[in-house]
Image: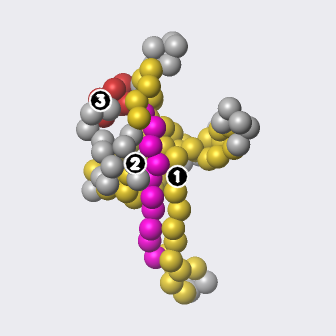
Amino acid sequence: MTENFLRLSGCITEKPTFKVSPSGVGHCYFTLEHRSVQKEAELPRNVYCYMHIVISGTLATQLKNKLSKGMQLRISGFIAYQKSANNIGKLVLHAQYIEQI
């Protein structure tokens, strides 16, 4: 198996939404804003990005009323490519571990 693991910290940008799939699995969706200074070519570089986050199953159900806009989180999981109904693609972090910081 090949590796697919990402850990990212940041701030929730909007109120998370919670939905239940037709198969009965709960999913929580939100966007995380990350800002940091990273070293590249021995120089400091300001880094900024938005990452779409999906939490599914038991973890989503446990957190659905505990997450809010502005919370600082550290999230670990795997990334996947998803296409929306209008065929626009994006990378999504599927959270497997979440820690408030």
Residue position marked by numbered label 1 in the rendering: 51
What is the number of the mark on residue 14? 2
Task: Name the residue type under label 1.
Answer: Met
Residue 89 image point, x, y percent: 69, 44
Residue 64 image point, x, y percent: 32, 32
Quadrant location of the C terminus in the rendered image: bottom left
Residue 81 image point, x, y percent: 66, 41
Badge 1 marks a residue whose secondary structure is: strand
Q: Earlier in the sequence, mark 3 or mark 1?
A: 1
71 in the magenta segment = no
Q: Is residue 68 above or below residue 85?
A: below
Q: Classify 10 Å Cα crowding around label 3: few (below 14), some (14-19), many (20 and above).
A: few
Residue shown at the point (45%, 37%) measured from the top left: 29
Q: CA distance from mark 3 to mark 2?
A: 19 Å
Task: Name the residue type under label 2.
Answer: Glu
Q: Is residue 94 above or below residue 18?
A: below
Residue shown at the point (44%, 25%) measured from the top left: 19
Residue position marked by numbered label 3 in the rendering: 62
Dividing the picture into quadrants, the one containing residue 80 is top right
Residue 42 image point, x, y percent: 56, 86
How many numbered markers are drawn? 3
Left or right of residue 71, residue 47 in this image: right
35 in the magenta segment = yes
Q: Which residues are magenta?
A: 28-37
Dividing the picture into quadrants, the one containing residue 58 is top left
